[in-house]
Amino acid sequence: MQDAITRNAVPIKCKPEVLEGFYIRSAMQDSNVELAKYMGIHPSGASRGKQSSIKMASYMVARYGVPSFAVETRAGEEVLVMSSDGTQLTISKKEAQILLPLLNALRESQEKAPVAPEA
């Protein structure tokens, strides 16, 4: 999972085999012709290479995650990426609206706190 985090990607929380099963079931719902057209290859190539391609893709997604730019957010749930000292945190707009007033209050209380005299 560390690889996905360092690449600014959305980490995957399941095993590659779970992803593989999902992709195989999804591909079986489509016909080989439709899948081949989408991939731009001959239908026989889609049929022969489906299993190995899905297995390799599943392991890569599980290892490296999904790039954050490839993930579509729902309306009203924009994702903010905040960087501080090289660390990155991804939060939703709703979470940011809750956190910002709390952080501002904390900052203000630290500014108003009396400084202890040195002895």
Image (cartoon, helix red, strand yellow):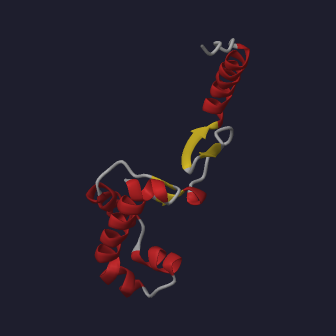
Q: Is residue 32 left or right of residue 99?
A: left
**Residue 22 x %, y %:** 34, 57
**Residue 25 x %, y %:** 33, 60
Q: Is residue 41 shown above or below 21? A: below
Q: Residue at x 65, y 13 (%)?
A: 117
Q: Is residue 53 left or right of residue 10?
A: left
Q: Residue at x 38, y 81 (%)?
A: 46
Q: Nearer the viewer, residue 44 or 113?
A: 113
Q: Is residue 44 left or right of residue 93?
A: left
**Residue 101 x %, y %:** 69, 22
Q: Residue at x 66, y 43 (%)?
A: 78
Q: Nearer the viewer, residue 27 or 7?
A: 7
Q: Is residue 10 visible?
A: yes
Q: Residue furthest left?
A: 17
Q: Is residue 74 visible?
A: no
**Residue 94 x %, y %:** 64, 31
Q: Is residue 96 shown above or below 118? A: below
**For residue 59, what is the image quadrant?**
bottom left
Q: Quadrant of the C terminus?
A: top right
